[in-house]
Image (cartoon, rainbow, N blue to C red):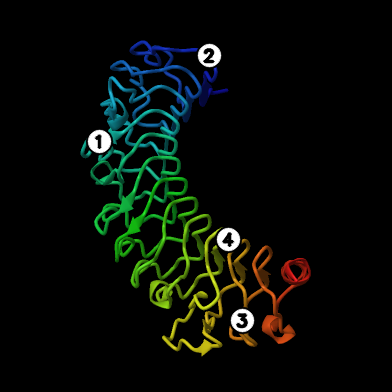
């Protein structure tokens, strides 16, 4: 029986000697040195694994500390079969240009919990198969238009829990295959028209726990396949409701921008905002809506017809009714 996985987690390891796997000649598929105290990796430490290693986990270590904030490890570059690389929760601030370019099979890259001040665009060049990129819990403050040019194959992107205050127009233009985008727990106060241009296959968008007072229809116009829109814990107010409209047919009802015919929306979460009024028919055109969450807002007047949605299920409706009772 062949051994295909080697794990030494929580072992207090501070250094790895060279040629660690050379003599064993094991067809390892996964190597896990996470949750140790490794500061750097010696040369040849992964020698012998180049052609068959699929997963390398180095998360929760001390890589890229204050003495070596730029992470570059030539041994990783030789792992041409690698599909998953986990460098999460280290101290990496930047990565060398083209550092990962030879990882032609890489699909999943975990970089969360590091010290990145900007998107590591130069290091992502050449990752033509990358599907998942996680960058939450860093110190990124802006996503520029060119930040994701090198990763057009992404289907999942998480940049939550950063310090993002600005998303440039067309910042996601190249990500036509993206399905899930998490921007929660940042410092966004507004979204420009065209912010989400190009995201024609996006199904889940989370912009919760920011400082948004409105979500302009122009920012969402390309999101024709959106199923879940999460906006809880923002500052959305009366008169500045969300404009969801794929045909640019925004209507105004009582000073509130109506929700247009985005028929694929199934889950809309507006919990814990400052919404004080919902005119009759606000959600009428969202024919696919199944869960609507409006709890903990400021509504003082309520029209039963406001919540008329053909397919709304009991779970979503219960949130609305609880909100109505509590806030009266």
Q: Secondary structure at mark 3?
A: loop
Q: Number of numbered discs present?
A: 4
| Dot 1 crowding, Cα within 10 Å, few <14, some 14–19, many 20+ | some
Give coordinates of residue 327: x percent, y percent: 73, 68
Question: Alpha-carbon distance for marks 2 and 1?
Answer: 28 Å
Q: Name the image quarter holding the C terminus.
A: bottom right
The residue that label 1 is drawn on is: 99
Judging by the rendered image, the residue that carries numbered circle 2 is 11
Comes first in the chain, label 2 or label 3: 2
Image position, residue 250 (x, y; %): 46, 86
Where is mark 4, residue-wise?
232
x 63%, y 63%: residue: 271
* Residue 137 position within the rendered picture, expressed as x and y whole percent measured from the top left: 45, 40
Q: Specify which label sits upstream in the sequence, 1 or 3.
A: 1
Task: Tell me which numbered mark, 2 or 4, is placed earlier along the sequence.
Answer: 2
Label 1 SS = loop
State the separation of the CA atoms marked 3 and 4: 17 Å
The front one of 169 and 262 is 169
Q: Residues within 10 Å of mark 4 (few under 14, many from 20)?
A: many
Dot 2 or dot 1, earlier in sequence:
2
Question: CB of mark 2 within 8 Å of CB of mark 3?
Answer: no
- Say which mark, if any, is on residue 283: 3
């Amino acid at each position: 029986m062949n051994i295909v996985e080697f794990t030494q987690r929580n072992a207090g390891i501070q250094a790895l000697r060279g040629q660690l796997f050379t003599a064993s000649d094991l067809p390892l598929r996964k190597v896990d040195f996470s949750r140790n105290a490794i500061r750097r990796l010696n040369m040849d430490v992964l020698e012998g694994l180049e052609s068959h290693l699929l997963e390398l986990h180095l998360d929760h270590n001390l890589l890229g500390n204050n003495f070596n904030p730029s992470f570059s490890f030539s041994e990783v570059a030789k792992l041409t079969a690698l599909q998953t690389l986990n460098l999460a929760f280290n101290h990496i601030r930047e990565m060398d240009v083209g550092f990962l370019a030879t990882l032609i099979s890489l699909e999943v890259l975990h970089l969360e919990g590091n010290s990145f001040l900007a998107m590591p665009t130069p290091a992502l060049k050449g990752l033509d198969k990358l599907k998942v990129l996680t960058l939450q819990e860093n110190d990124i403050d802006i996503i520029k238009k060119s930040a994701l040019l090198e990763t057009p194959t992404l289907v999942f992107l998480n940049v939550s829990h950063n310090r993002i205050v600005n998303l440039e127009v067309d910042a996601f233009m190249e990500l036509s295959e993206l399905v899930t985008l998490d921007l929660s727990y940042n410092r966004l106060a507004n979204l420009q028209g065209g912010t989400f241009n190009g995201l024609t296959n996006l199904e889940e968008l989370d912009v919760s726990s920011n400082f948004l007072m409105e979500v302009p229809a122009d920012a969402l116009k390309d999101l024709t396949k959106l199923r879940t829109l999460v906006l809880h814990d923002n500052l959305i107010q009366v008169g500045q409701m969300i404009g969801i409209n794929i045909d640019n047919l925004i209507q105004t009802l009582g000073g509130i921008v109506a929700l247009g015919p985005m028929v694929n929306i199934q889950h809309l979460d507006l919990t814990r905002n400052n919404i004080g009024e919902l005119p009759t028919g606000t959600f009428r055109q969202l024919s696919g809506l199944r869960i609507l969450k409006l709890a903990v807002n400021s509504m003082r007047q309520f029209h039963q017809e406001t919540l008329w949605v053909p397919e709304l299920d009991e779970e979503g409706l219960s949130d609305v009714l609880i909100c109505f009772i509590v806030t009266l």
